[in-house]
Image (tube, helix red, strand yellow):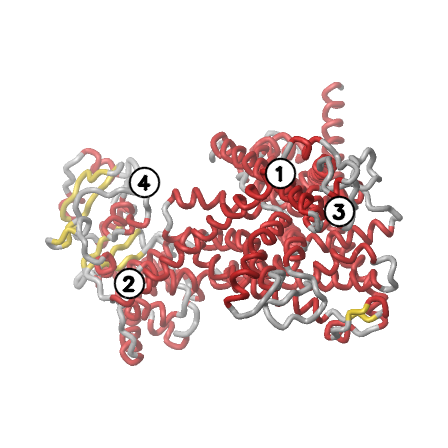
Amino acid sequence: MGPSGCGKTTLMRCMNRLTDLNTQTKVTGNIFIGDRDILNTHDDINEIRKMMGLLAQRPYPLPMNIFNNVAYGLRISGRKKKRFLEKRVEHYLRQVNLWEEVKDRLRDPAAALSIGQQQRLCLARGLAVDPRIILADEPTSALDPISSQLIEEKFAELKTSYTIVMVTHILRQARRIADHVVFMYMGEVIEQGPAEEFFQNPQMEMTKSYLKGLFY
Amino acid sequence: MNRRKAEELFFRVLMFLSTTIILLVLCHIIYSILAAGLPHLNWDMVSKVPEGGYYFGKGGGILNAIVGSLYVAVGATSLAFAIGLPLALFMNIHLTKWKKLVNGIRFLMDLLCGIPSIVYGAFGFTLMIFFGLRTSLLAGIITVTVFIVPIMIRAIDEVLMTIPRGLFESALSLGSTKSEISYRVFFKQSIAGIITAMLLSFGRAIGDAASVLLTTGYTDYIPTSLNQPTATLPLAIFFQLSSPILEVRQRAYASAVILIAIILFISLLARILTYSYKKNKINY
Amino acid sequence: MKFRAFEISRKLRNSIHTGWMIACLSVVLLIPLFLTAGLAIKSFPLLHQHPLLSLIFSSNWKPLSGEFGFYPFIVSSVWVTIFALLISIPICLLTSIHLTQYAKKWVLKIMQPVIDILAGIPSVIYGVWGILVVIPFISNHIAPMLGKSSSGYSILAGAIVLSIMVIPFVLNILIELFNNIPVELSEASLSLGATRWQTIKYVVLKKGLPGIISSFGLGMSRAFGETIAVLMVVGNVAKVPTGILQPGYPLPALIANNYGEMMSIPQYDAALMLSAFILFVVVLFFNAGSRILIIRSGKHN
């Protein structure tokens, strides 16, 4: 959490090693997942990325139909059996409450869905590769209130089985779903801690004024 | 897993090769023309018109074609600029409300840019005959103008499109008329880009052979009025190259060196301008 | 009073400028109209006597006895264009993917001017290069390799020269196209564990498909109308070509070579104008088709 431009998204991109794509960016330090340092490793980078599902600010459905969007990650990792794919796709679409809405038009292009549906499709797509972590970068910022609520509810449900790292600048959203809060400002972590403690009893002056709404 | 990596590697090698091929082809074109032409390039080539027996290998140069090409290109670029600049400004300032119309004009201009120059040449030829003109400098200038006007309009238009709406609105709020915004604000804001657009059109005008082939004719003299036939550089190369005499063909290569030097100079100038433009432009 | 006069002169200047702008617009909008009308009227005398199809599919080209069969020229044009595209398409696709997806900044910094210069080189220079390099190469190396003899002036030579000319044109369109595909789309695919190449194959190329097709359409119309460079290397023999090492005689070359006599032989002018008209229509068709495809696919997203 933090005001815009404070480096939340950049931090998240480091976790997913998407910073590798940008030749001008240099990342130093360590990022540990369990006891594995994913920044300084020669392991297959695609394996690392696969551990983490990414949900971007705006939904970016791949240029293919709804079914293939979800099946894409599975196909990439070599699962090609049709029966298996159908089962998995249905499972994950049900998990994001999208199945009932799209089951009759799985072969339609994903771009034809509403933006809220697209975001849930992207979530299903990310879940389908069976990640351990979900990275969500202000996943509701482009959505209408109702779709936002659906996503938030889903997150509250999913956080029992996945680690969810979510970037947000909406204070109340953090209050609603966070277990652990990291507050950033100007590229630095100001304060972090369990959500309850953080909101009830912030330590730093800056955190206090941010929580009071003195700056955004 | 290994097969996947091998596939990617295979294609990456292919990609690298094809990029290299493009680079090498350009180098090779320039190299082979310089190698064939430079030894035969001398001061007479650029300072004299063909003398008697030139086309049998005797003395003289292609000053007629150089000057003729410059006449045609300068004339056509100025005319195209006089038509193209107001039109591009009109599209971006007066017609902002009619987006569909502007997009329609853009579409049409794009189509006109794609029409081969020989078609414009043929069209110019019929026009010429219709008006009872002979092949002449004027006919050439008009044909080349028609041919580069769409290019010029689209190039200027692309520059003007990058100017933010806010500038237009704030100028309007100060009480400027639309023509004042056009020439005092938009034109000044994008002057370097507009000059680049002119250079681009100039390059096309001086390098194109097919449109002038049918309309300007060819002569050994430097034209002194608009209704005389005029030699042009691409045609000088073309005609000399089809000669059976070796020395004349060698002069064709030397002429090619001159043309390529002009084109490279223009493209260098445009590049420098674009660079300084990017450096000095106010960023919003 | 003085202020009022100033205001009036400002208004007057504004109307003069606007008037001139509208005049320019009308002149430019009239160009395509005049172009179509002029070519159509001029080629009408021939179309009036022979049906279009018999002109297109007849191979008898005897202007002196009034027989005008365009078949050899059309076939030559089609062959040269298709072979030029066959050479340039893979190079353009591979290079554009390399430059937009893999290449480092400095490679782009070198290649962008290279492409621009290639695009700016006049066609007559390409023709000179063709004569200096491509023709001897074909007659000394390629033809013997295929067990044939050839002067070098052939469909293949035209296609090679043409492919080099089309490359910068198509490449620029493709580079812009790939750069406009949102990075987030590739990121989405990468985050699902796809490799860079898989992402390009399944996402980038798929997303860009309409644009890729239309870039080829635009390249094709560019190739179809190219005149001088092709004319210089293609041989110009008015026979239907039967192999790529044989000379051909494309439509633009036909016009450029014969315009001098076109007023002295009856109906010859109509025949040449008809070939210009055919060129015009074909090029316009592919151009418009490609551009509409781009616009449509842009709207869809």
Residue under label 4, please give it. Answer: A5
Above or below for A111 versus C59: above
Q: Quadrant of residue C51?
A: bottom right
Residue drawn at (78%, 48%) of the image: B215
3 and 4 marks on the same chain: no
Q: Are marks 1 and 4 in contact (CB under 8 Å)?
A: no
Q: Secondary structure at mark 2?
A: helix
Chain of residue at mark 2? B
Residue under label 2, please give it. Answer: B5
Q: Secondary structure at mark 1?
A: helix
Q: Are marks 3 and 4 in contact (CB under 8 Å)?
A: no
3 and 1 marks on the same chain: yes
Q: Secondary structure at mark 3?
A: helix
Q: CA distance from mark 2 to mark 1?
A: 53 Å
The label on residue B40 is 1
B60 or A165: nearer the viewer? B60
Number of residues whose C-alpha sits closer than 10 Å to that of mark 4, classed few (under 14), some (14–19) or many (20 or more): few
